[in-house]
């Protein structure tokens, strides 16, 4: 498969695009690392303690910290319930922080504040 000139140009200039993106959004990389670490901790805990698969753990984490709570999965032991309670508090803080930053960027871009 051969790349078009336009695709090859963009592919070769990707490091430059990434540099300017992270220069404009310096905390984005840190936010992504925090999210990955947050999910990694949850997946390791729920996989080992509850015996869930990685997919089930990711699903439970996402549904729980987003406060949707469908109820297909639940923590079975008291220790898991305590962990989940504190885990969700931090997850909700991360979600609200990310939403606040995204909304702030949007308001600044739209209204030029």
Image (spheres, helix red, strand yellow):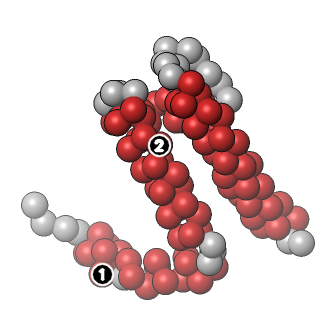
Q: Is residue 43 above or below residue 31?
A: above
Left or right of 113, for residue 1: left
* Residue 29 locus on image (x, y percent): 53, 70
Instruction: State the residue in front, 62 or 73.
Output: 73
For label 1, the SS is helix
**Quadrant occupied by the C terminus:** bottom right
Vertical order, 35 against 82 (above or below): below
Instruction: Give how far across and how far down residue 51 sits, in percent.
Output: 33, 27
Q: Quadrant of residue 91?
A: top right
Q: Residues within 10 Å of mark 2 (few under 14, many from 20)?
A: many
> Residue at 13% of width from left, 66% of height from top?
2
Badge 2 or badge 1: first in the primary sequence: 1
User: Measuring 58% from the left and 37% from the top, which residue is drawn there?
Assistant: 83
Circle 2 or circle 1, nearest the eye: 2
The residue at 39%/82% (across/down) is 15
Q: In the image, which disc is placed on residue 12? A: 1
Closer to the camera, 85 or 77?
77
User: 8 above or below 89?
Assistant: below
Query: Which quadrant: the N terminus?
Result: bottom left
Provide the residue designation for mark 2.
42
Q: Residue furthest left?
A: 1
Where is residue 40 drawn, in percent x and y? 42, 50
The residue positioned 55% from the left and 76% from the top of the image is: 21
In the rendered view, would you say 41 is above or below 104? above
């Amino acid at each position: 498969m051969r790349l078009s000139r336009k695709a090859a140009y963009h592919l070769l200039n990707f490091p430059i695009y990434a540099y300017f993106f992270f220069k404009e959004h310096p905390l984005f990389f840190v936010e992504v690392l925090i999210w990955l670490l947050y999910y990694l901790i949850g997946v390791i805990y729920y996989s080992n303690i509850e015996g869930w698969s990685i997919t089930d753990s990711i699903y439970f984490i996402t549904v729980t910290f987003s406060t949707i709570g469908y109820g297909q999965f639940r923590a079975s032991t008291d220790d898991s319930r305590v962990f989940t309670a504190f885990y969700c508090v931090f997850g909700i803080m991360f979600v609200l922080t990310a939403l606040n930053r995204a909304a702030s960027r949007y308001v600044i871009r739209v209204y030029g504040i």
